Image (tube, rainbow, N blue to C red):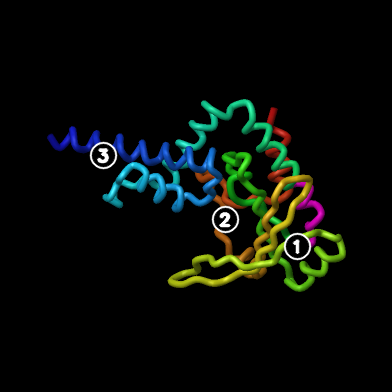
Amino acid sequence: MAKARSRKDLNLRLHIAYLAARLMAEDGVSDYGAAKQKAARQAGLRDANLLPDNHEIEAALREYQGLYQKDDQPLQLRRMREVAVQVMREFEAFHPALVGSVLSGTAGRHSDVNLQLFPDDSKALSLFLLNKRYEFEEGARRIRRGEGFIEVPQFALEVDGIPVTLTVFDPDEERSSPRPRADVAPQRARLAEVEALLGTEP
């Protein structure tokens, strides 16, 4: 009896992951947490212990894209990585790093290019955007740090029709980042690494 219950729970967990993946691929829900919560409501799930983790949702998203978006998604991903390289070259003085779905390979038509910048002077970035005549929106993003949260500046712009989000961090954040492990996919990529990704794509 316990085994049947365990299999039922596993199937429900996979179902929630698939629903969340579809929400991300088709409806543009960009946050894993928001996608899984919305999927749980759709499925009538009340047991938070059965919610899939982010890795399970990402696996379901890759499977969904491979089945239903196999013609469009790889082209969209490549275009976004090309824009990422273009912007990283232009903003090289601000130590850009690519993060998010464009790096992981799960970006779709609702995604944006997410870059982290580590300028020595954050005001210099605003001046740079103005001097380059970029149209942009300036705001802030709340992120977790330790036991609490901090707000960091964020800029939204568009490059060749692709939305780009620039999140600005203190240079100390860059220096204190853990070194990538060989057995874990990189969470942050420099210009040369993104260029290498493009070079290995068909």
Q: Are marks 2 and 3 in contact (CB under 8 Å)?
A: no
Disc nearer the start of the sequence (2/1): 1
Identified at 44% across, 44% down, the residue is 55
Rendered location of residue 38, percent (x, y): 41, 48
Name the amino acid type tagged 2. Answer: Arg
Residue bearing mark 3: 9
Quick one: quadrant of the N terminus?
A: top left
Disc 2 versus disc 3: nearer the observer: 3
Q: How crowded is mark 2: few (under 14 residues within 10 Å), some or many (20 or more)?
A: few
Disc 1 versus disc 3: nearer the observer: 3
User: Relative to 3, does residue 160 appear above or below in the rendering?
Assistant: below
Q: Is residue 50 left or right of residue 24?
A: left
User: For numbered disc 3, what is the local secondary structure?
Assistant: helix
Name the amino acid type tagged 1. Answer: Phe
User: Relative to 122, does residue 78 appear above or below in the rendering?
Assistant: above
Residue 179's disc is 2
User: For numbered disc 2, what is the local secondary structure?
Assistant: loop
Identified at 54% across, 32% down, the residue is 65
User: Relative to 38, does residue 106 appear above or below in the rendering?
Assistant: above
User: For numbered disc 1, what is the local secondary structure?
Assistant: helix
Q: How crowded is mark 3: few (under 14 residues within 10 Å), some or many (20 or more)?
A: some
Comparing 91 with 131, the one in front is: 131
Residue 25's disc is none
Q: Is residue 120 left or right of residue 188?
A: right
Identified at 77% across, 68% down, the residue is 126
3D distance between C-alphas at marks 2 and 1: 20 Å
Identified at 63% across, 63% down, the residue is 174
Residue bearing mark 1: 94
Rendered location of residue 148, percent (x, y): 46, 72
Determine which quarter of the picture holds residue 134: bottom right
**Is 201 contained in the magenta span?**
no
